[in-house]
């Protein structure tokens, strides 16, 4: 149990376009979902925390108007990178936690590799 | 904010030897300490975790120890195998959000 999927797994886009990434919890209801960004050979940096039906909480330095997060249901959260630029190229990973005994545990999606040309 | 320091950044061990990775943290409110293994280009996988009411936890060749007074915790891998080669991240959580360490690149040589 506790499987998280992400789509797409990779995307190449032109500078200025918007890209939407989906994160789904397949076999559980996710009380909270998290979005991370990971640059090569670096750690995971939390971008934002989202709860179903409420606005996402962004970390300091993350532009909420550039990285739009929608947590439409208990199994789906989306991240939209608006007006993407080459510096937004990165590995974006979501994670989800569930209510219950292991609510602190985060289960990670497989990641989305974004390349902006 | 919380700061998590992880050492060493790289660790090369001979197959069969033990590997130890250490993390220190600053937020005394932290009460959950997971360790993740990440292979190149893949998702982080939870390998073991410990909560603040426990000092040590073991799962086969992997163990984690926690010293809440000193604010540090360690990952121990015994009898290392080539498939243990990966990047390992420690993390702390006190308010539901994770703060990750910088990662340790572990290379197990046959």
Image (cartoon, rainbow, N blue to C red):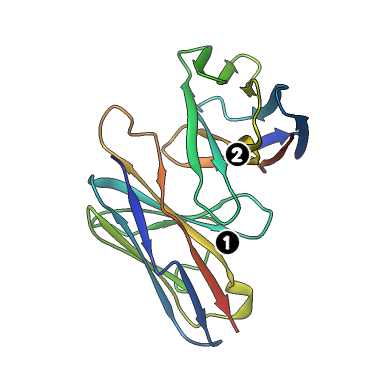
In the rendered image, the vertical position of residue A43 relative to residue A17, given as above or below: above
Q: Residue A93 bears which disc, if any?
A: none
Q: Which residue is disc 1 drawn over?
A: A61
Residue A25 visible in the snapshot: yes
Q: Which residue is disc 2 drawn over?
A: B89
Q: Nearer the viewer, residue B83 or A69?
A: B83
- Identify the residue at horizontal 70%, vertical 24% (top origin): B20
- Identify the residue at horizontal 40%, vertical 69% (top origin): A8
Indicate which label's residue lies in the foreground, 2 or 1: 2
Q: Please tell me in which quadrant of the rendered image residue B77 appears.
A: top right
Q: Secondary structure at mark 1?
A: loop
Q: Is residue A65 left or right of residue B25?
A: left
- Identify the residue at horizontal 63%, vertical 49% (top origin): A43
Q: Is residue B87 left or right of residue B58?
A: right
Question: On the rendered image, what quadrant is the N terminus of chain B found in?
Answer: top right
State the separation of the CA atoms marked 2 and 1: 23 Å
Residue B32 visible in the snapshot: no
Q: Please tell me in which quadrant of the rendered image residue B3 appears.
A: top right
In the rendered image, the vertical position of residue A109 relative to residue B100, given as above or below: below
- Identify the residue at horizontal 49%, vertical 50% (top origin): B43
Specify whether disc 2 shares its chain with disc 1.
Answer: no
Q: Is residue A72 left or right of residue A32?
A: left
């Amino acid at each position: 149990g506790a499987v998280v999927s992400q789509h797409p797994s990779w995307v190449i886009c032109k500078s200025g376009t918007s890209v939407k990434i989906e994160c789904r919890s397949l076999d559980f209801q996710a009380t909270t979902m998290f979005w991370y960004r990971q640059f090569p050979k670096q750690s995971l940096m939390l971008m934002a925390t989202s709860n179903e039906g409420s606005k996402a909480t962004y970390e300091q330095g993350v532009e909420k108007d550039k990285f739009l997060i929608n947590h439409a249901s208990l199994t789906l959260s989306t991240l939209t990178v608006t007006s993407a630029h080459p510096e937004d190229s990165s590995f974006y990973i979501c994670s989800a936690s569930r209510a219950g005994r292991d609510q602190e545990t985060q289960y990670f999606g497989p990641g989305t590799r974004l390349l902006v040309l | 904010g919380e700061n998590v320091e992880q050492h060493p950044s790289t660790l090369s061990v001979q197959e069969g030897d033990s590997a130890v990775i250490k993390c220190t943290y600053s937020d005394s409110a932290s009460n959950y300490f997971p360790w993740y293994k990440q292979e190149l280009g893949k998702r982080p996988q939870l390998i073991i975790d410990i909560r603040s009411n426990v000092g040590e936890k073991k799962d086969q060749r992997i163990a984690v120890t926690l010293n809440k007074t000193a604010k540090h915790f360690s990952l121990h891998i015994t009898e290392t195998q080539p498939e243990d080669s990966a990047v390992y991240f420690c993390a702390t959580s006190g308010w539901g959000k994770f703060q990750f360490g910088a990662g340790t690149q572990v290379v197990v040589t046959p």
